Amino acid sequence: MSRSPFTLLRQPYRTHGAGAWLALFLVAAFCMSGGGVAVSSSSSSSSGYAGPPGASAFQQCVIQRESSGNPTAVNPDSGAGGLYQFLPSTWHELGYSGLAQDASIAEQNRAFDKAYERWGTQPWAPSDGC
């Protein structure tokens, strides 16, 4: 004798009450949605910094793909940091001291402009799809 899916969904309700049914429903919805969870912080917008006024679509794309708009983001594997995920060696080659993630947003934007002027989209486009 086969059970319908609805019979299985009703079982938690009969056994454990509405809370168990709701939990099962939420888990199923979570799985069907791809399992993503959006978390918002009250200290910043959910999308983070999007770029300076007049930023190109490419610059905005790089910011979102590299750091989700977080100017202090750091890649623990490579050490790349900041909005544009500059490697420390690239940051220094551009003439800056310290680390990109410790620099102001304005300084990170100037570094992006300098890198874009030297190398165009090459440092980002192949891996970011921007």
Image (cartoon, rainbow, N blue to C red):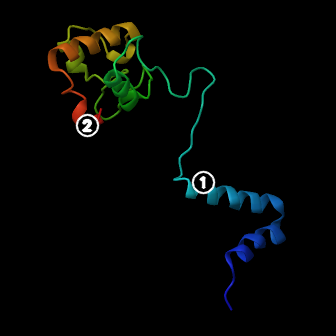
User: Which quadrant would residue 1 be assigned to in this image?
Assistant: bottom right
Residue 87 position in % (x across, y down): 25, 24
User: Which quadrant would residue 5 be assigned to in this image?
Assistant: bottom right
Eyeballing the image, is 103 above or below 24? Answer: above
Residue 30: which numbered mark, if any? 1
**Element marked by disc 2:** helix
Q: Is 56 displayed left or right of 13 in the figure? A: left
Q: Quadrant of the C terminus?
A: top left
Q: Compare residues 55 and 104 and report the one nearer the observer.
A: 55
Residue at point 25%, 29% (across, down):
124
Mark 2, other Cα within 10 Å: few <14 / some 14–19 / many ≥20: few
Taking the image as drawn, is residue 118 in sight?
yes
Please name the residue that numbered disc 2 is placed on.
127
Sequence-wise, the earlier of marks 1 and 2 is 1
Residue at point 21%, 25% (across, down):
121
Mark 1, other Cα within 10 Å: few <14 / some 14–19 / many ≥20: few
Seen as rendered, the residue at the extreme bottom is 1
Q: Compare residues 43 and 115 and report the one nearer the observer.
A: 115
Eyeballing the image, is 94 above or below 19? Answer: above
Q: Is 12 displayed left or right of 62 in the figure? A: right
Residue at point 56%, 43% (across, down):
37
Q: Amino acid at mark 2?
A: Ser
Q: Compare residues 12 and 46 and report the one nearer the observer.
A: 46
Residue 12 position in % (x across, y down): 77, 69
Q: Amino acid at mark 1?
A: Phe
User: Which quadrant would residue 101 be assigned to in this image?
Assistant: top left
Residue 24 position in % (x across, y down): 69, 61
